[in-house]
Image (spheres, rainbow, N blue to C red):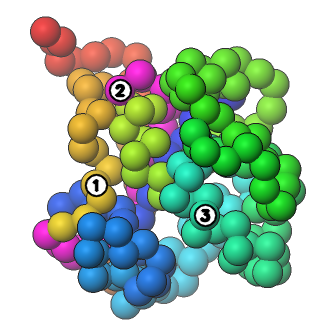
């Protein structure tokens, strides 16, 4: 079975919107795009390259796909596997795109993602995709979180844990702190749920 791994740059107050650049995602009048830039260092770069070089397919929301599709085909030297990975995209309006291979999922996204998890293939990596992640969490489809937690609060923006959050337990299997205070942590699902659900 394939795992779904959510990989995110996240602020202390849970924001994952537009970490990479000022115009990356300004929806909701978000004005803090590019907020991770001051925190780059060798430790973080090495950790990112390790994740980017693992075997993977992508599971993306439509907004993230629209941001990435014009960029990554022009920057294959930075992330070799991104263009050859199958991109599974949650969208009710798009069915075909030039950035291939891409598979567009509509209708019951949770059901379709659950079926993809049962297939043979590499793990499914989710970057960005704030709305899609709420659906994945709500339907208990996330197997792990690989988070880069930055020592900054942003006050507004799309959050990792929002409307879809349900009680789930995780264990830390790997962690480190960069020279600029970014906590890199890998959370895997725990087999024991310490919380009682209603």
**What x and y, as percent, mark residue 33?**
36, 81
Residue extending farthest bottom: 38
Percent of width and height locating residue 109: 54, 28
* Residue assigned mark 3: 66
For image coordinates 82% across by 68% down, the residue present is 80
Answer with the quarter of the image where residue 193 lies. Answer: top left
Determine crowd level at label 1: few under 14, some 14-19, many 20+ residues with C-alpha closer than 10 A: some
At horizontal 35% and vertical 26% (from top left) the residue drawn is: 138
Residue 43 relative to residue 180: left or right: right
Label number found at residue 159: 1
Q: State which tag comes first along the sequence, 3 or 2.
A: 3
Q: Nearer the viewer, residue 29 or 189?
A: 29
Q: In this rendering, which labeled residue sits more in front, label 3 or label 2?
A: 3
Which residue is disc 2 drawn over? 138
Rendered view: 126 above or below 118: below
SS category of the residue bearing label 1: loop
Please state which of residues 172 and 151 is positioned toward the viewer in this rendering.
151
Q: Is residue 32 left or right of residue 174?
A: left
Q: CA distance from mark 3 to mark 2?
A: 24 Å
The verdict on residue 152 being magenta is yes
């Amino acid at each position: 079975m394939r795992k779904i791994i959510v990989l995110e740059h996240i602020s202390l107050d849970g924001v994952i919107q537009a970490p990479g650049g000022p115009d990356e995602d300004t929806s909701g009048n978000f004005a803090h795009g590019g907020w991770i830039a001051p925190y780059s260092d060798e430790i973080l770069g090495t950790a990112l390259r390790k994740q980017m070089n693992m075997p993977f397919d992508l599971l993306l929301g439509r907004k993230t796909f629209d941001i990435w599709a014009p960029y990554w085909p022009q920057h294959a030297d930075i992330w070799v596997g991104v263009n050859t990975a199958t991109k599974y995209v949650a969208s009710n309006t798009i069915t075909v795109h030039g950035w291939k291979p891409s598979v567009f999922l509509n209708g019951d996204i949770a059901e379709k993602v659950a079926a993809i998890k049962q297939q043979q293939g590499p793990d499914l990596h989710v970057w960005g995709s704030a709305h899609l992640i709420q659906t994945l969490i709500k339907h208990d489809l996330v197997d792990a979180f690989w988070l880069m937690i930055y020592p900054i609060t942003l006050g507004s923006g799309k959050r990792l844990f929002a409307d879809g959050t349900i009680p789930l337990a995780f264990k830390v299997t790997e962690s480190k702190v960069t020279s600029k205070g970014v906590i890199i942590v890998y959370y895997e699902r725990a087999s024991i749920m310490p919380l009682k659900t209603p």
